[in-house]
Image (spheres, rainbow, N blue to C red):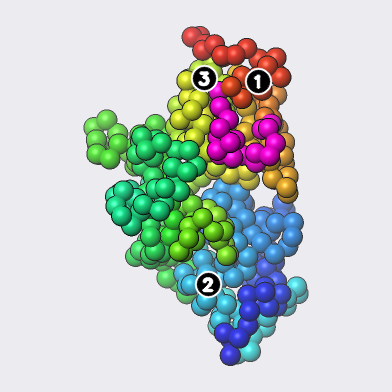
Amino acid sequence: MATTFGFANIRVTNDLGSFLLSRLGAPSPSGNWLCPFHADTNPNLHITPDGEHFKCFACDATGDVVDLVARFDGITVREAVKRLSNLNFRPGNHCKASVQPTQVQVAKPAAKSAWQDRDWQKAIDGVIRYAEAQLWESVGHPALDWLRERGLEDSTIRRFRLGFVASEQWHRRFPVLGQNRQGEDHKLFIPRGITIPWVRPGSWYASTDDEVEDPGSRWVGCNVRRLSIGDITTPLSEGPKYQALKGSERGHCYPFSDMVRGLPALVTEGELDALLAWQEAAAFVNVLTIGGVSQRPQQDAMNALAECPIHLLAFDHDVNHAGDLAAQKFSELSAGRARRLWLPSPANDLTDFHRALGKIPDWLASESARFGQPWPPTQSHS
């Protein structure tokens, strides 16, 4: 039976590259594919160096071959394991099955950015409102305590409308999300965890609509910090820590797109570090993240960063050096403005530093002195 196959066996017997070739065709000259999980116009989906995982630079979709099948076909991970157990995607053997397979169809990419679609926008707004309310109910108390333990104050949590989804949910199908290989519109999946909404550049986080002042779509996306079932402090057994809702567009500045001209930019790796830095040091720096170390900034983010004379990179100190590699890539985009910041050992990120009673403004002052930069920084009025 298919269910006797373990996850490890499925990954070994199904080559990720061969699977991508069968579904998406040949990659671009850069070795990347157009990502089927958002309206991709520049090939952003690639295979990571270990050869067993995929990642999209733009929407941050990530996982292994099991996750890929689940997202492609709109099914659960367990159903994806069953489906893959009947297939044998090996290098040079793009689709050998124990039964005659139906003709493989390439998933259709979405025709436009999902956040510009009225139905998707309404659904995402509903998810954000529901999760926001749940966080402050009894069901959300463990998640709220988890956020507080990270150093976030209630006023910060409320201002940026963080929320909590207690159990994973499936929303209806949306044409704007494109189609799976069965020709069906993709469904919207909401994982269990902390919801982190991203506002459209120029919009704001108000819970009331103002179609006169802000006639455009409110949200460009929503990320979810997935949490374990039961004791939420235990590490996740599988899958990524963060999962953006399908159709989300990453690469914009979070939490705000507007910069104070002349103040440095403090660029963090993730949203929760960004909120902590904003809470503690927004008077001194423009705090932002673009959604992860592998994320490419949108043009509006590059325009915003151009307002800042120096870019302070507060990326994590990972054992796999992902933060270091991201800093190098960011430096190439910053035209000499980027400066890599270093946290006192053993802190791995800003949250660790804050938990150890570190003062973020004092640390920024110390790091600025190392670069020969004045502190506090002076706002430009030009």
Q: Are marks 1 and 3 in contact (CB under 8 Å)?
A: no
Quick check: is 31 in the magenta stretch?
Answer: no
Which residue in the structure is indicated by mark 2? 77
Extreme residue toward the top, this view: 382
Sequence-wise, the earlier of marks 1 and 2 is: 2
| Residue 305 against residue 5 in the figure, above or below | above
Residue 372: x percent and y percent?
70, 14
Q: Residues within 10 Å of mark 1 (few under 14, many from 20)?
A: some
Residue 193 shows in the view: yes
Question: What amino acid does circle 2 point to?
Answer: Val
**Magenta extent:** 342-361
Which residue in the structure is indicated by mark 3? 284
**Residue at (65% x, 41% y) in the render:** 348
Instruction: Give the structural element (helix, strand or loop) at label 1.
Output: helix
| Residue 170 against residue 277 in the figure, above or below | below
Answer left or right for 382 relative to 119. Answer: right
Instruction: Give the structural element (helix, strand or loop) at label 2.
Output: helix
Answer left or right for 310 relative to 285. Answer: right
**Is residue 336 or residue 230 the one in the foreground?**
230
Q: Residues within 10 Å of mark 2 (few under 14, many from 20)?
A: some
Question: What amino acid does circle 1 point to?
Answer: Ser
Residue 167: x percent and y percent?
39, 63
Marks 1 and 3: which is nearer the front?
1
Marks 1 and 2: which is nearer the front?
1
Q: Quadrant of residue 295?
A: top right
Which residue in the structure is indicated by mark 1? 366
